[in-house]
Image (spheres, rainbow, N blue to C red):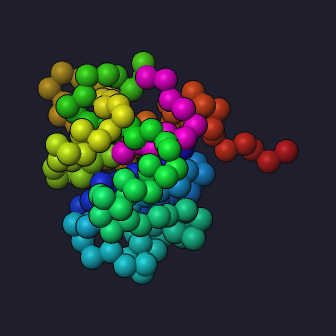
Amino acid sequence: MRLALFQPDIPQNLGAALRLGACLGVPVDIIEPCGFPLSDKAVKRAAMDYAAKAEVQRHDSWAKFLQTLRLDSGRLLLFTTRAAEPYGQFAFQHDDVLLMGRESAGVPDDVHAAADARLFIPLAPGARSLNVVTAAAMALGEALRQTDGFPKPPA
């Protein structure tokens, strides 16, 4: 299981996503360019003391990310408000990559087209969307529950 962030706009969200990945033992892919200067120092600052615990892979473009993904042969699952399938009814697999869109604009049509599945989180009427890291936490929670992928407590 992996969490991928498409061109994140907000450094604090990236930090929270890295903390989420570190706490759940899920690697995080950052697909650049970001909406802010991304340096190792900036990542460490955004993720606080969790940066050292997070497994992070940076990709300098969507094309480079796709090359890496296809080599690893995991399914690409896009979480989007433009989806037809609710995430709670989807059957996750242990090697899935959960892709979250850019906070300001989601993802372009070519990214939509590349996804193996497009999923949404049901919201109350009138609500537009969740914070990207809140959505990621919900998605990872369900995916890890289905695949028995949560970290095991020490014996």
Say left or right for 40 vs 93: left
Q: Quadrant of the C terminus?
A: top right
Q: Position of residue 109 (x, y in %)?
A: 17, 43
**How many numbered discs sit on the rendered protein?**
0
152 or 59: nearer the viewer = 59
Q: Give the residue drawn at x 24%, y 71%.
A: 36
Q: Quadrant of residue 60 in the image?
A: bottom left
Q: Residue furthest right?
A: 155
Residue 27 at x, y percent in the picture: 53, 55
Whether the magenta-drawn stretch holds residue 96 is answered as: yes
Look at the magenta stretch and give its main secondary structure. loop
**Residue 108 visible to the viewer:** yes
In reply to whether residue 148 is colored magenta, the answer given is no
Drawn side of residue 52 relative to residue 3, left or right: right
Q: Magenta stretch: give its range.
A: 90-99
- The residue drawn where x is 55% and y is 62% is 55
Q: Which quarter of the image is occupied by the N terminus?
A: top right
List x then y, in percent, for residue 108. Answer: 17, 47
Residue 14 x, y percent position in the rendering: 37, 61
Please name the residue shown 37% across and 53% down the image.
66
- Is residue 108 or residue 103 the one in the foreground? 108
Is residue 124 shown above or below 9?
above
- Residue 137 position (above or below residue 86): below
Residue 145 is at least partly visible in this image: no
